[in-house]
Image (spheres, grey):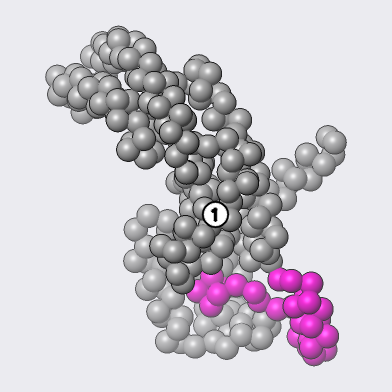
Amino acid sequence: MNWSYFPNTEKAYNIYIEEIKNLQSNYAPFAIGQEAIEFETNSELIFQKHKNSILNNFEKDFQVFEDAAVLTTEWSSFKHFKDKYYTFLGVFFDEFPDAEEIHYIEKEYLFLKEEMPIEIFIRDSHTYKKLNYSNKKKIAFLENKALELGYEMIYQSQFNKLTLLKKPSPIDSNSNTENYSETEKIKWLGTNLELYELIKTLIEAKKLKGKNQKEVFITLFNLLGMEYSDIRKKEAMATIRQREKDKTPFVDLLRLSLEKWVNDRDNNKLM
């Protein structure tokens, strides 16, 4: 959330956070039993005490912001956002000359999807509901823009993470089909690292078996027309082991893609 547009809201919210921190200092980090109940009760009292102040300041700040007609994507109406899309895009390119349109779409999409820290205080307000309706339209607009550029967007809400799937163009698909030999029936469209990760996952899950692991890797790489390398495999395994947050991004992407296909099929049946 860009607090620069909401100075009074930020001040009211920080007072609430400070009081919550003071309350937390009086309890053990992992309070249980009666102590946990007491902490939750006091937390709710503090929330109710500050709710109206945060909400009222948000409404006032937003009115000042709206009256000033500031050029921004975050808090504008959908009509303003759509009409000024290429103006916003131009500002983005001025700041990041080597970026592409899909990078701007990604930035705006993640911002619109991210939950505001004050959301729990303002959900019942007219302003929030108005913004929420606008943002839903903006998100759909950005998804369509991404599709026009050949990208499908898969969003992971728990991490506020967006994965962009590049779809081959019809021209590329046709040329690939024509250039396939009789023995090259399928083509790998991912990265080398993703292929190493996929094969390793299947091996560790005991879904693939060969004379040894190297034979499995070589066989599948050859099948997909890819060049296998012991050195690259070691580098890929090292990269996977060194990940700190997202341990299995490609495997997670496969799951999300399949879930999206299932949900889309189910939704189509209901229509």
Which residue: 33% across, 36% down? Answer: 3
For residue 235, which quarter of the picture? Answer: bottom left
In the rendered image, the residue lying farthest to the front is: 68
Query: Is 171 included in the stretch rendered in magenta?
Result: yes
Q: Is residue 14 left or right of residue 270?
A: left
Q: Is residue 50 left or right of residue 82?
A: left
Q: The residue under label 1 is which amino acid type?
A: Thr
Residue 176, above or below 13:
below
Q: Is residue 235 left or right of residue 213?
A: left
Q: What percent of the width, then of the height, locates residue 254?
A: 61, 58
For residue 146, which quarter of the picture? Answer: bottom right
Which residue: 63% across, 80% down? Answer: 220
Q: Can residue 268 be seen in this view?
A: yes
Which residue: 57% across, 26% down? Answer: 130
Which residue: 61% across, 54% down? Answer: 153
The range drawn in magenta is: 168-195
Say which residue label 1 marks. 87
Task: Work out which quarter of the rendered image holds the C terminus and state it.
Answer: top right
Task: Work out which quarter of the rendered image holds the N terminus and state it.
Answer: top left
Residue 147, above or below 267:
below
Label 1 environment density (alpha carbons within 10 Å; few <14, some 14–19, many ≥20): few
Residue 260, above or below 184:
above
Q: Is mark 1 on a helix, strand or loop?
A: helix
Q: What percent of the width, then of the height, locates residue 20?
A: 23, 21
Residue 266, above or below 31:
below
Q: What percent of the width, then of the height, locates residue 167?
A: 69, 66
Query: Is 191 included in the stretch rendered in magenta?
Result: yes
